[in-house]
Image: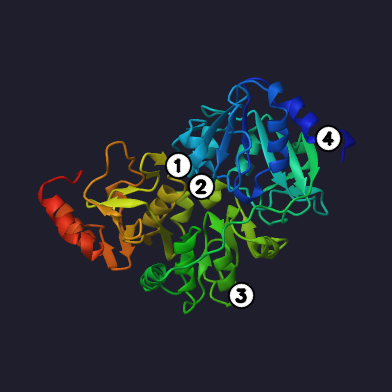
Amino acid sequence: MEKGKWLDAREALRRTVTPGSRIFFSMASAQPQTLLRALAADHPYYQNVEVLNVYPVADHPLAKPGLESSFRCVSLQNGPALVSDWKEGRIDFIPARYSDIPWIFSPKGPAPIDVALIQVAPPDREGRFSLGASASLAYPLACGAKKIVAEVNDQAPRTHGPCFFSADKIDFLIETSHPLFPFPEVKVTAVERRIGEIVASLIPDHATIEIGVGNLPGAILQQLEGKRDLGIHSGMLSDPMIALVDKGVITNRKKNLFPGKLVAGELFGSEKLFRFAHENECVEIHPAEITHNPRLIGRLQNFVAINSTIEIDLGGQMNGEFLGETQISSVGGLFDFVEGAFFSGGKSITALTATTGSGKISRIVPSFKRGTPVTLPRYMADTVVTEFGIAELKGKTLRQRADALIAVAHPEFRDQLREEYRKGLMVS
């Protein structure tokens, strides 16, 4: 390996990032913090650099006051770490389906990447650097970037799958050592547990499932302990999934694609998850072209997509992005997995608590407030689950949908929802 490739972060960045560059950095637990902090510390050197991010779990060092002339921060998926930066106007946003992102930022797309900043594990015996905990976007975007700068973190897991680079594909390497950012531990409420029980009743043995992370997905996974031979094809792996692997519930034996493999693009969890995935041949981390490809997902037998949303109107439209006037998320992989479930002849389940705000706000609403985006159109609505039951929407008329959704709304809001519907306030 060429010694000249190994530099300190400041020097490597100065050699690759130029005024007007568009750069991308690895997401979530694999955020290359050494490189980002070096950019922030050296910010007077940079001008008008566009910085792309996807769901940073940790603080975004480049989206801070006083750095605006150096860095223009653009998000593809907001998260809790970006809320204040968004509200204060230091983050812009690109709406995009997850499966479209690799093409949008490819050399042939409308916004090609100049420099990819990635985190990798130390090289394996063949000298290959695994992208470890985050590859769904980092791998395809780095493949198309003009330059790659990689921080080699000796605490990053070395994962199997196609997402690795040999040293000759990387322009500069940075040595670093720090723990990966963990995802918050799941804390399940009684309401979420009830929703989990209902969702579990809809999932057959031998199903291949997609599900996200957080308290409600964790609650659903906890209720699957009685199932047999489940498989995973998902955007991310989480600690509750590993618990089901340990109990013999998730075996991946019945998958017709990638049999025996946990397939995902990201690791979202604790150090236990990272150690589980390290050099584990049963875990494969893939690019979005595999994990979020609706046509490929459509070939999976017994596929069930399990997702959530912020609110749903009485026609079945879903808002999974806006809370009030704040962009707190994005479409992410929702559209891709719902479409994949349709192609497969499987099922798409949207699970949500009936209320929020200590029970004061219904999440089933007559219509959305003006300016609220429709993350999933009503034409793609399938099965909705709250703690009050199941609403089957596919193939139903607007009146039938309204009746079904009102029936699973919190009882305190049902009369109000019926009255609003009668007044014709529903957006249709």
Q: Earlier in the sequence, mark 2 or mark 3?
A: 2
Whether residue 246 is visible here, answered yes or no, is: yes
Q: CA distance from mark 2 to mark 4?
A: 33 Å
Residue behind mark 1: 97
Going 68% across and 37% down the picture, which residue do you hit?
Answer: 36
Q: Earlier in the sequence, mark 3 or mark 4?
A: 4
Which amino acid, by three-letter code, is at mark 2? Pro
Classify residue 52 as left or right of residue 169: left
Between residue 136 and residue 339, name the one nearer to us. Answer: 136
Of badges 1 and 2, nearer the viewer stands: 2
Placement of 398 over or under 26, stated as above or below: below
Q: Earlier in the sequence, mark 1 or mark 4?
A: 4
Which amino acid, by three-letter code, is at mark 1? Arg
Which amino acid, by three-letter code, is at mark 3? Asp
Q: Are marks 2 and 4 in contact (CB under 8 Å)?
A: no
**Percent x, y of residue 203:** 40, 70
Of badges 3 and 4, nearer the viewer stands: 4
Going 73% across and 56% down the picture, which residue do you hit?
Answer: 158
Which amino acid, by three-letter code, is at mark 4? Leu
Going 66% across and 51% down the picture, which residue do you hit?
Answer: 162
Q: Earlier in the sequence, mark 1 or mark 2?
A: 2
**Residue 7's disc number:** 4
Residue behind mark 3: 246
